[in-house]
Image (tube, rainbow, N blue to C red):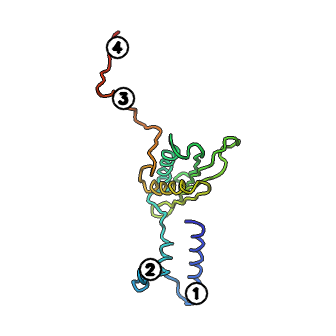
Amino acid sequence: MGRKHRLVVLVALILAGAGAGCSGTAPQIGLPSPAETSAGVPSATAALQGILTPQDLVKGTPTEVYTRIARGVLTCWFGADGPLKAKYIYHADAEPASKGGRSEIKIMTRDREAEDPRALRAYRVVIAPSEDRKAKVEVENLRLPQPLAERFKLDVERWSKDEPGCGEGPVTAGWGAEPAIETSAPGKKEKSKKP
């Protein structure tokens, strides 16, 4: 959720609390009745509830969610023909599961002339623990071009839910654990070597 949305939610909650202080009852946010909506337009209560719904919670521990996202980023975006491989660097910090499993994936701009090539942060993905074996995933675009950032965000959302694939582009996995199977072209006979 962006900073502007958080500010709107904070102001709405403060105003709701101030209004409740005058009436002596605590504010309650619930589903609006059909009478509260007119001509298919939701009421302010329904709109506020839509903002407060935790859309970014996904099933799995933070470590599991981090693993799924990191695998996707390294395969699709930093793979052999990945769109970020030439100009960006992948960097991640992850706590062990015993300490909560909080992790952060940082996509850094590449500066080949600098002593440390990780010049500036371009994108970040934060995975934090939540209750009921769920994790909270937040993304922030700092310097990626907007079309690329939108594709990246959609991929992160998909991977966090354990849905495979590389979105719009082809899968560019660099290698597999299984050995390659050699096959000969059909119609060609292999010549045997005589000693």
Residue with the mark numbered 4? 193
Q: Which mark is residue 106?
A: none
Q: Nearer the viewer, mark 3 or mark 2?
A: 2
The secondary structure type at the circle numbered 4 is loop
Q: Is residue 145 above or below residue 30?
A: above
Front one among 27 and 143: 143
Residue type at mark 1 is Gly
* Label 1 vs 3, first from the N-terminus: 1
Q: Secondary structure at mark 3?
A: loop
Q: Which mark is residue 182?
A: 3
- Residue under label 1, please give it: 21
Q: Cα distance, mark 1 to mark 2? A: 28 Å
Determine the CA span between mark 1 and mark 3. 76 Å
The numbered mark, 3 or 2, whose residue comes first in the sequence reads: 2
Asked if marks 1 and 2 touch (Cβ < 8 Å), the reply is: no
Q: Earlier in the sequence, mark 1 or mark 4?
A: 1
Residue at 51% x, 44% y is: 82
